[in-house]
Amino acid sequence: MAQAGVGDRWRPPRGRHRLPPEVVARSQRERLLEAAIRVVAIKGYGAMTVSDLTREAGVSRTTFYELFEDREACFLAAYDSAVDVLVRRVTKAYESEVEWSERAAAGLAALLETLAAEPALARLSLVDVGNAGPAAQRRYRAAIQRLTPLFEEGRDFAPGGRNLPANTSRMAIGAVTGLLADELVAGRGEQLPGLLSDVLFATLVPYIGPDAAAREVDRLTR
Amino acid sequence: MAGSETRRQLILEAMVRVVGRKGYKATSVADVIEEADVSRTTFYKHFEDKHECFLAAYDLVTKRVLDAVIANCDAEQPWLERMRVGLATVVEMFALDPELARTAIVEVAAAGADARQRHWNAVARFTEFLADGEEMAGNRELPENIALMAAGAVSGLIFDELLTGRAERLPELLPDLLFAMLVPYIGPSAATAEMRRAAAG
């Protein structure tokens, strides 16, 4: 898989080297973000310590504090990077289709596949963010807002869509995240792709109603 | 023993108050016993730790909300009327008691996997109450977890409002919440009509 991002494992050579400090710092920062994702997946945000992170990432405590103010800051940065990965993959799949219902189906399929394939990412972005205090709760909201435009296109697709409530997209997103969270909380993360019909229905229904949504789901998920 | 049960209730009530004000993470057992005006010994007689106490407090909150909804809703009423009344009941409870709202909708996510499990169980119970709508919606085949979708949509809107606004403002959101809850069953045109009725009434 050629995807860059949270999976990179390049390290600068040990000891003295002539790499620019920014390059070294970037690598150390990425390793700490990856470490945060792994540690949170194992023990949850509450139990994650700076020592856990420095040990997992192979950096010193001094380096940690050069890069992050505290463990919360590192967690929030890891969360942001996880959201970046998700939004990028969903958007790419979304934009590969033309008609909105097909775009939604592609984007949701990419979302479910990514979450199922990377359970640590799924836990971090949907589950642990609720545990990490007010700053994380606000980040969660901001992440949702990044996906809102993808749902907003439903207004143009649906007859009379312009007259729908302003927060219709937020309703659709809430319905989808509710379904996902329910599955993840029950420990059925690997079964997420099986939810495609339901999350697609939940996305389409506020715009085109249950009959049309059911028909589209049938057509698009065969 | 009557006294013991009363103290247990006081502690649970105090947990709801403190978590609703400070958030789950920032709440300590010391906070709770101060609010409840009980001793630490008494607390630990009833609960193993903060977490266990929170789970019991959450169950209390859920029961309180469900009881109020059931009390206000008449099985004889048409389905749509029950939906309106049920949702309005929840919204009013939350608006009158912001700490309850925050505990029920926001802070439950901060209290661990078993708390989140209880939340979705509560949502399922509330939505069983909505499930009658599936018959009313006619013969079309609706997804099995349609009620969870409707509840997710409603709770997402309430979550946002609690995070960025004030619980006291929730009644203003009632028309939108009604739309969110009804639209999977009756579609956007009919849901818009219900929304406008609620806004006018």
Image (cartoon, grey):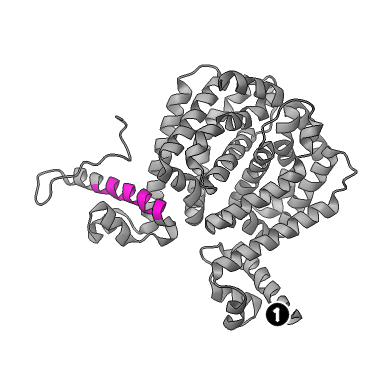
Crowdedness near tag 1: few (<14), some (14–19) or many (≥20) residues, C-alpha within 10 Å: few
Q: Chain of mark 1?
A: B
Q: Please state the extent of the stretch shown in magenta in the rendering.
A: A28-42
Q: Do we see residue A160 in this rendering?
A: yes
Q: Is residue A73 left or right of residue B133?
A: left
Q: Quadrant of the C terminus of chain B?
A: top right
Q: Is residue A220 left or right of residue A163?
A: left
Q: Is residue A40 magenta?
A: yes
Magenta-drawn stretch contains A113: no
Residue A29: give x, y in percent of width and height: 28, 48
The residue positioned 41% from the left and 61% from the top of the image is A47
- The residue nearer to you, when weighing B47 against A27, is B47
Per the image, the residue denoted by label 1 is B4
Q: Is residue B39 above or below residue A151?
A: below
**Looking at numbered disc 1 in the image, what kind of residue is underneath it?**
Ser
- Residue B29 is left or right of residue B13, and the answer is left
Residue at (65, 73) in percent of width and height: B11
Which is the main secondary structure of the residues drawn in magenta? helix
Q: Nearer the viewer, residue A197 or A205?
A: A197
In the foreground, B67 or B198: B67
Which residue shows up at 72% across the image and 28% down it? B188
Task: Where is residue B191? Give x, y as percent.
Answer: 76, 32
